[in-house]
Each structure stands twice: as C-alpha cells, then as structure tokens.
Amino acid sequence: MSLASWFKWNEPQNRVSQRNPTEMVTETLMMELSWQIKQAEKQQHERENEYRKIKTGVDYGWLVSYPKHAYDISPTERLQLEDMCIKIHPPYCGPVIFRFRQLIAEYEPEVHEVSRLFRSVLQEATEKIKEEEEARKLARQWNTKQKSSVSLMSFKSRAKISPFISGIKTISEDVERGSQPTRRVWSMPEFRSAKDF
C-alpha cells in the first residue's frame, strides 16, 4: 500500500461537477451579499469613528475594537433572497454582481439598506430574464409562422408576373394619344400564363 493512497492525492476532485448550477449561483450571490454587508458595516464604523474624532478632537480609534460581524439579515429575509437567487440563470450571475457593486459604490448605503438594494437588483434581473424569455417565445412563434408561409410561397404556379414587358400600355401613353384608357388597372402588373412566352 502506497503512501499516496493514504492522503488521497490521486483522487480527482468531482465536488464541483456534482453541484447544481442554480445552487452555485445562489451560493455565489449570497456570499456577495454577506461580503457587501460586512463592507458596509466596516465603512459605517469608520464613519462613526471619524465623526467622534471630529466631535471630540481626540482619536481613540486605536482603543476601539469592533465586533467582527454584528449585523445580519433575518432568516425569513435570507430565505426570500435565496428564493429570488434561484430564479437567476447562471449567465446572469456575473452581471447581477456587477450591477450590485455599481449600486453599492454609487449610493454607499447603510448596513440595513444593503439587502434592500440587493433585492432590487435581483428583481431587475428576473424581470429582464422574463422579458428575454418572452422575446424568444415570440421569435419561435414567428419563425414557425414564417416557415409555414414560406412553404406556401415556394409553391410555383404556372402564371408569371411580367411588370416590365414593352407591350404594356400605360396611362401616360393614352393621355398623349388622347384616347380613353381601358378598364384595366394600370398599377397592377400584367399576368400571363406560361403558354404566352
């Protein structure tokens, strides 16, 4: 028995492939939320420390120890956000995170506002996904209708349309000659059968 088999170095790592993509998206998005909450909390403590320093004129920041993570969202809100994250398709995970980070940088929200901002980004993404699915559905319907109409158009009849034949009389020729135009509608092309050619 070799030493490598004890440490299981030679076994392939199949953990990543066994996971469901929706679970990975949900986990990634929730990790991003918790990280942004920690960052917002850290920035809030820094702002409070700066305010105290300005107010008192003395910096006691080196004495203050902050709890590592004091704020957390409620379990019901966490479950609601996870349910919303499940609706996000894997290709949209990156753009959702990017949009969330943009809004965090733009608004610099308080700690308790981060989850609401995250919820709005998720709602925006799910609406966009629904719109794109409806557009794909309409495109599929249009393509099936168009295929059926193309099949009807491919039916070749024996009558040919000849709009540029020199023997066609026009209204302007009749006006120049001073004669009455025939009852034929002049804007329509002349139809002839294949025997006439």
Image (cartoon, rainbow, N blue to C red):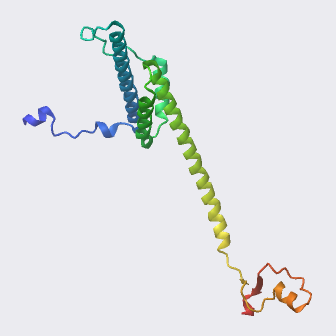
Query: Is residue 110 left or right of 173 when viewed as pictured?
Result: left
Q: Quadrant of the C terminus?
A: bottom right
25 and 155: which is toward the camera: 25
The image quadrant that residue 64 belongs to is top left
Residue 29 % position (x, y): 40, 31
168 and 104: which is toward the camera: 104
Q: State whether residue 103 is above or below residue 140.
A: above
Q: Who's the residue at 42% across and 38% down the image?
A: 93
Q: Who's the residue at 46% across and 40% down the image?
A: 89
Query: Is residue 50 left or right of 75 when viewed as pictured?
Result: left
Q: State whether residue 175 is above or below residue 131.
A: below
Res 22 visible? no
Residue 143 % position (x, y): 60, 59
Which residue is situated farthest in the right direction here?
A: 180
Q: State whether residue 54 is above or below residue 14.
A: above
Residue 61 % position (x, y): 27, 11
Residue 31 % position (x, y): 37, 28
Q: Who's the residue at 42% across and 19% down the image?
A: 111
Q: Who's the residue at 45% across and 41% down the image?
A: 92
Res 24 visible? yes
Query: Is residue 107 left or right of 12 when viewed as pictured?
Result: right
133 and 11: which is toward the camera: 133
